[in-house]
Image (cartoon, rainbow, N blue to C red):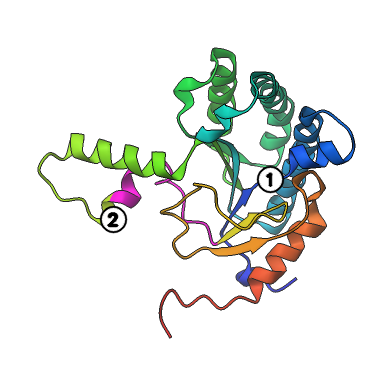
Amino acid sequence: MEQMSTLPTHVSIIMDGNGRWAKRLGKDRLEGHKEGIESVRACIELCVELKIKYLSIFAFSTENWGRPTAEIEGLWALMIKALRAELKTMMKNNVRLVILGDLSQLGEELRAEIDHCMTESKNNTGTTVIVLLNYSGKWDIVQAANRFIKENPGKEMTAEDVDNYLITAQVPDPDLLIRTSGEQRISNYMLWQCAYTEFYFTETLWPDFRKSEFRLALDAFSHRERRYGKV
């Protein structure tokens, strides 16, 4: 691994491949999601170890509502269980949890657990873990524009205004975006924020993406030259 200075400040991950992982093993799709939680835990642990300041994960897109109802309900149940199980560890490791997206469509029990975990961890100063839930990049840009227009009638919107009105305004743009499972697209995720993000695609399915695979992505990033349009 390269020196700490070459590590990204913000790593974002599109967690893909849970269903395919389960299918290969002849298991129900929810089993893939359960195993995927272990990968989330491993990635958070590595970020804490390496002092990476921000880790964001794409947990559920607005388009995912098209999945079978049983799978969606199972996901919410898994998320509630994971939040309850992991809060103590997050507090021990000084991890701050932030969950962003259109949370109004989520069930009352899940929203209550989200509020509790965010409130309990809000003063932690180590790695910030951002979970994008019921989120899409297009939705984020539209809500930013609508809020700006409502609060600033007659004013022309600037790029800086967009930055400030996105739901991720409190978080720096990702330096590195990782997508697992071999797909090479960003699937309506952080469309504005990823303007100069480095992409890393891997064939590894998300449930198999653990610390060793994460280190490979970080090592690849450390060898990138980021010019931001300059020479």
Residue 75 shows in this picture: yes
* First in residue order: circle 2 vs circle 1: 1
- Looking at the image, which is closer to me, 66 or 51? 66
The residue under label 2 is 160
In the rendered image, residue 114, in percent from the top left (x then y), is placed at 57, 25
Residue depicted at 19% across the width and 36% down the height: 151
Left or right: 25, with 135 as reference point: right
Q: Is residue 180 left or right of residue 194?
A: right
What range is drawn magenta here? 162-175
| Image coords of residue 74 (percent x, y) | 70, 21
- The answer to whether residue 122 is seen in the rendering is no
**What is the C-alpha distance between the residues marked 2 and 1?**
31 Å
Local secondary structure at mark 2: helix
> Can you tell which quarter of the image residue 231 is in?
bottom left
Specify whether residue 167 is painted magenta: yes
Q: Quadrant of residue 29?
A: top right
Residue occupied by mark 1: 16
Secondary structure category for the residue under label 1: loop
Going by the numbered disc 2, the residue's amino acid type is Glu
Considering the whole magenta stretch, tell me its main secondary structure.
loop
Side of 176 where 213 appears, left or right: right
Name the foreground residue: 13 vs 83: 13
